[in-house]
Image: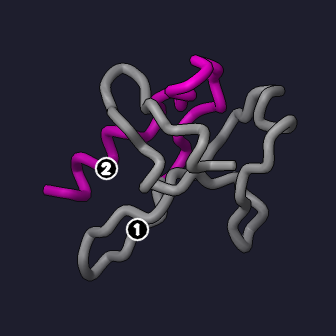
Amino acid sequence: MIESRAKNLIGKTIVSEETGRRFGIVGDINFIPESGELLSLVLIEPTKYTGEINIERDDSGRMVIPFSSVRSVGDFVIVSEKEIV
């Protein structure tokens, strides 16, 4: 059940709670299979804005947003920019 909910995040636009700026789109999700704990969202199609801030990268060089920074999910994934940078 957790996996199916997590898959619903893929393709949603990630937006800053503080500024309303777009970061890009959720392309994948990093999680712990045994527990289903969500670790981070993998960012695809990053916007120009993401180049201006220091977003963490995984071992493959992909930009990742810690799941702990997610504030809400609806049509968009709203994240706290303060917790990312």
- Give the secondary structure at mark 1: strand
Q: CA distance from mark 2 to mark 1?
A: 9 Å
Examine the structure image and report whether residue 16 is included in the region drawn in magenta.
yes
- N-terminal of the pair, mark 2 or mark 1, is 2
Pick whichever, 18 or 29, lies toward us.
18
Would you name the residue on which mark 1 appears? 31
Q: Relative to residue 4, is residue 40 depicted above or below? A: below
Image-quadrant location for residue 49: top right
Identify the amino acid type marked 2: Ala
Residue 13 shown left or right of residue 2 in the figure: right
On the image, the x and y values in percent for residue 56 come to 71, 58
The reply to whether discs 2 and 1 touch (Cβ–Cβ < 8 Å) is yes
On the image, the x and y values in percent for residue 22 come to 63, 23
Would you name the residue on which mark 2 appears? 6
Q: Relative to residue 35, is residue 52 depicted above or below? A: above
Q: Going 64% across and 31% down the picture, which residue do you hit?
A: 24
Q: Going 72% across and 73% down the picture, which residue do you hit?
A: 59
Question: What colour scheme governs how the chains and residues are painted in the rendered image of this protein?
Answer: one colour
Residue 27 shown left or right of residue 23 in the figure: left
Residue 21 shown left or right of residue 68 in the figure: right
Q: Going 60% across and 38% down the picture, which residue do you hit?
A: 81
Magenta region, residue range: 1-28
Pick whichever, 85 or 56, lies toward us.
85
Identify the amino acid type marked 1: Phe
Examine the structure image and report whether residue 52 is included in the region drawn in magenta.
no
- Give the secondary structure at mark 2: helix
